[in-house]
Image (cartoon, rainbow, N blue to C red):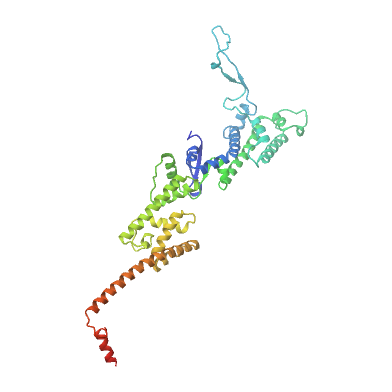
């Protein structure tokens, strides 16, 4: 089933946005996340047991019940279940009905509470599931029980001194309201443990995964929704190049490789097309990246340029495309605008690109010089052909200049 296990994605400012999706759907598109959930499975089991214990304890404390209700409903004792197959006949006799009509009758307890307080306290003391907190939970229980015994909130006098009784023995002789007080203190501690683990998971991806959470600080809600729309519906509802770049980054981060490739290819295509279109229109590269006197026709090149210059994890294809374009168009005016954004590694790559492009530029310039030389030779021949030549095969004006010099 692809929609069986809900998970929470937390994003936005201060992780205030909580979005619910399904683990199976996401893992179908991300081997990375699937491996993380498998690795976190043992810890997930511990968290689930701790959650169940905490939720069961919550049913026995305020605001669910007050001390009087706790006492009246006998919520401190083990539930008593008696299965009584019955049927009342016209002869006023009990008959055993078929199995399908079996009824369960409960005595001495509320039908809404099948797990009672004392067994929960003993479970927490003997086997609290979360690693690192068992001693704290046990100490809390022992201190709370000892406090109630000192206050003489017990049903009867034990045959042995209270100090010699086990935890189970002490709990059995406590009055219901005393048991309620122990449960309340225990619940306070396990609730604080839960809050502590939730906070720790914001810095620990392993804990977050075990809690069925994906923590995405600094990621906008719209970016998460766009990525999830592709996962669930295979549509690309991107609004502009900035969001496309953001979705590509998130897809790479979560291991959704197919979507990351689609976004990267789309950005490379539209960036290259925008540069070629600008060449045809006579628009400068400086205008494309936002430093021209007039706005560019679109923001595609500017967005990719800014990320390529500042994001060291930017895709290699996009960085190469921007660096090569910058190397080809770079002049003193453009350099004054972009030099503050170029880091050391980018500067080295830019120099390498310029060196690589230099033979192409030299070939083009040599071609232009060759054309110019041929043009000059043709012009010189035409001039010489129109001049008279003397016996020394020299132009007349040269001979005259020599004679005048003598």
Viewport quadrant of the C terminus: bottom left
Q: How many numbered marks, from 0 up?
A: 0
Q: Would residue 198 be seen by someone viewing this image from the given angle?
A: no
Q: Would residue 318 be seen by someone viewing this image from the given angle?
A: yes
Q: Is residue 130 left or right of residue 280?
A: right
Determine whether 235 is above or below 245 in the image.
Answer: above
Residue for point 68% across, 34% down: 126
Residue for point 46% across, 55% down: 316
The picture places residue 138, in percent across and down from the top left corner, at 68, 38
Determine whether 314 is above or below 356 in the image.
Answer: above
Q: What is the quadrant of residue 357 in the picture?
A: bottom left
Q: In this view, does 90 lie to the left or right of 267?
A: right
Residue at the limit of the structure toward the right, as seen here? 160
Q: Which residue is at the front of the view, 243 or 49?
A: 243
Q: Which residue is at the front of the view, 196 or 141?
A: 196
Q: In this view, does 397 lie to the left or right of 335?
A: left
Q: Is residue 208 left or right of residue 251?
A: right
The picture places residue 258, in percent across and down from the top left corner, at 45, 45
The picture places residue 10, in percent across and down from the top left corner, at 50, 44
Residue at the limit of the structure toward the front, as seen here? 391
The picture places residue 292, in percent across and down from the top left corner, at 36, 63
Determine whether 104 is above or below 206 in the image.
Answer: above
Residue at the limit of the structure toward the bottom, as seen here? 406
Q: Which residue is at the front of the view, 241 or 81?
A: 241
Q: Which residue is at the front of the view, 305 or 406?
A: 406
């Amino acid at each position: 089933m692809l929609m069986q296990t809900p998970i929470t994605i937390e994003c936005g400012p201060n992780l205030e946005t909580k979005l619910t999706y399904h683990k199976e759907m996401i893992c179908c598109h991300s081997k990375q996340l699937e491996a993380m959930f498998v690795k976190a499975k043992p810890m997930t089991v511990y968290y689930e047991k701790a959650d169940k214990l905490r939720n069961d304890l919550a049913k026995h404390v305020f605001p669910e019940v007050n001390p009087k209700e706790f006492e009246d409903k006998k919520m401190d004792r083990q539930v008593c279940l008696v299965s009584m197959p019955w049927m009342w006949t016209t002869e006023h006799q009990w008959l055993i009905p078929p199995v399908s009509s079996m009824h369960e009758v409960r005595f001495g307890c509320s039908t809404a509470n099948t797990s009672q307080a004392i067994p929960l306290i003993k479970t927490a003391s003997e086997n609290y599931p979360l690693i690192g907190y068992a001693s704290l939970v046990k100490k809390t229980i022992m201190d709370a029980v000892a406090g109630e015994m000192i206050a003489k909130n017990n049903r009867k006098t034990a045959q042995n001194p209270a100090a010699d009784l086990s935890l189970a023995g002490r709990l059995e002789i406590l009055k219901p309201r005393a048991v309620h007080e122990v449960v309340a203190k225990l619940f306070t501690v396990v609730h604080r443990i839960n809050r502590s683990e939730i906070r720790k998971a914001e810095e620990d991806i392993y804990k977050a995964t075990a809690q069925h959470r994906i923590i995405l600080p600094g990621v906008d809600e719209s970016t998460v929704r766009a990525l999830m729309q592709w996962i669930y519906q295979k549509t690309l509802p991107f609004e502009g190049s900035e969001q496309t770049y953001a979705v590509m980054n998130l897809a790479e981060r979560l291991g959704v490789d197919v979507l990351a490739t689609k976004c990267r290819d789309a950005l490379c295509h539209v960036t290259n097309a925008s540069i070629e279109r600008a060449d045809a229109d006579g628009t400068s590269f400086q205008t494309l990246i936002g430093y021209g006197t007039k706005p560019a026709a679109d923001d595609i090149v500017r967005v990719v340029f800014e990320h390529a210059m500042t994001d060291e994890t930017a895709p290699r294809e996009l960085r190469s495309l921007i660096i090569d374009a910058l190397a080809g168009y770079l002049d003193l005016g453009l350099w004054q605008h972009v030099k503050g954004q170029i880091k050391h590694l980018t500067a080295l790559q830019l120099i390498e690109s310029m060196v690589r492009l230099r033979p192409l530029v030299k070939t083009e310039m040599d071609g232009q010089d060759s054309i110019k030389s041929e043009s000059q030779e043709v012009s010189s021949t035409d001039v010489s052909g129109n001049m008279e030549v003397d016996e020394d095969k020299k132009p007349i004006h040269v001979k005259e200049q020599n004679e005048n010099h003598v």
